[in-house]
Amino acid sequence: MQSAPHDLSAQDRRRGIWAVLLLSFPAGASYALVTPLMTVAMEARGHDALAIGALAAVFPLAIMTVGPFVPLLVGRFGTARTLLLSVLASAAAVSVLPQFDGIVAWFLLRYVVGAAIAIVWIASETWLNVVAPPERRGLLLGAYASVLASGIAAGPAVIALFGTEGRGAYLAGAGILLLVALPLLWAWRAVPVLPGQSPASVLRVAGVAPLTMLVGLCAGFAETAIFGLLPVWALRQGMGPPSDLLLLSAFAVGNVALQVPFGRLLDRIEGRGVAAAVGVLAALFALLLAASVGTWLVWPAIVLLGGATYAFYTVGLTLLGRRFPATQMAGANTAFVIAYTAGGVAGPTAAGWAMETAGPHGLLWTVALASAALGGGAMVARLQRR
């Protein structure tokens, strides 16, 4: 039987923190495995780019349509039970994918996987934010972001190990998803019970905390644009294989390595100030990367850019924890994830248009502009707060 957040003992809180950190790695790995695996499989089956792109869009669609109901689900069925059922549903959907050839079945199963991962994503982050001690919230959320990023970086390696032919990679993906359940079962009694909230309450959060929603929007915008288009940028700059893909690895290194330092900073400095600083730094690092083409500075610049843009997410989660009580955290986290997803849809679209219009550096100029807008918005919010 789970307890309300304020009834959890110190030991239960520690166990809950460890459980979320442990489950975040396989959760990130499974997300990063399923999407490219299905994309490559559809390409091998002869589907056109329109169908492949539409399948990729199913994941954000699932988040935006199911996300507003997550607070209602955790309130009605319990946080732990909702998490476990989502893990089982996603693992089952991934494991049966090879048995279907029709594109309609793949779209439906992709939606199931996306919806289930979205529930795990939102519920586990809410759990961590609720049990994290206020004086260490930034540090713990930074650690969470680093572990999640490590899982995302490891996911594609499973595809390389098993290949895309046969059932191996799909069964491995299902197995990784089931690993999410192990920390959950270990900490079952430490999972807090969260009150249910209606979908309408999720939408009201945007008006209550506009800066936090802006941080989430910019996080999704910058990360997705860079992950999607950085190899294209590198190739158009004359950086042939394997440098184009190694740049993504360097970007991921920044994601993993710099979140804990940013988190520690958040525990010492007012959140709006950190948001402003991170926005300015990300803009400067994007411009530095554009100016470093053809020199060794490209590599430290992309690492720093990865750390700064991913820090948007760490900052946003920390601001959520400070702004909302435990009774409203599920709805607030859902709104933040939806804002992040919306940015993930807009980012590659805007950056791709900028690259076609202004040349390869359009990607970095777009990221710099979005980051600077966040920095300016955070500075205005900080001045208004004072």
Image: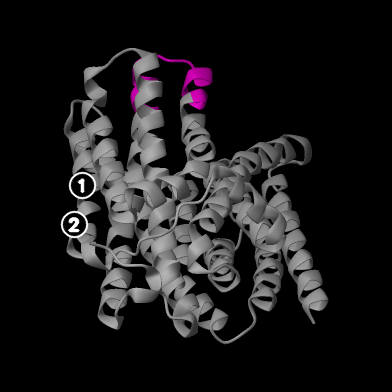
Residue designated by label 1: 178
Task: Give the quarter of the figure containing the N terminus.
Answer: bottom left
**Location of residue 170 with respect to 385 vertically, above or below:** above
- In this view, the residue in front, 306 or 275, is 275
Q: Position of residue 377 (x, y in %)?
A: 77, 64
Q: Residue at x 55, y 43 (%)?
A: 199
User: Which amino acid type is shown beneath numbered disc 1?
Assistant: Leu
- Residue 270 visible here: yes
Q: Are marks 1 and 2 in contact (CB under 8 Å)?
A: yes
Label 2: how many residues lie within 10 Å, few (<14), some (14-19) or many (20+)?
Answer: some
Residues rendered magenta in the picture: 39-54
User: Which amino acid type is shown beneath numbered disc 2?
Assistant: Leu
- Residue 15 quadrant: bottom left
Dot 2 lies on which element? helix
**Location of residue 9 with respect to 219 vertically, above or below:** below
Dot 1 lies on which element? helix
Task: Give the quarter of the figure containing the C terminus.
Answer: bottom right
Residue designated by label 2: 182
Label 1: how many residues lie within 10 Å, few (<14), some (14-19) or many (20+)?
Answer: many
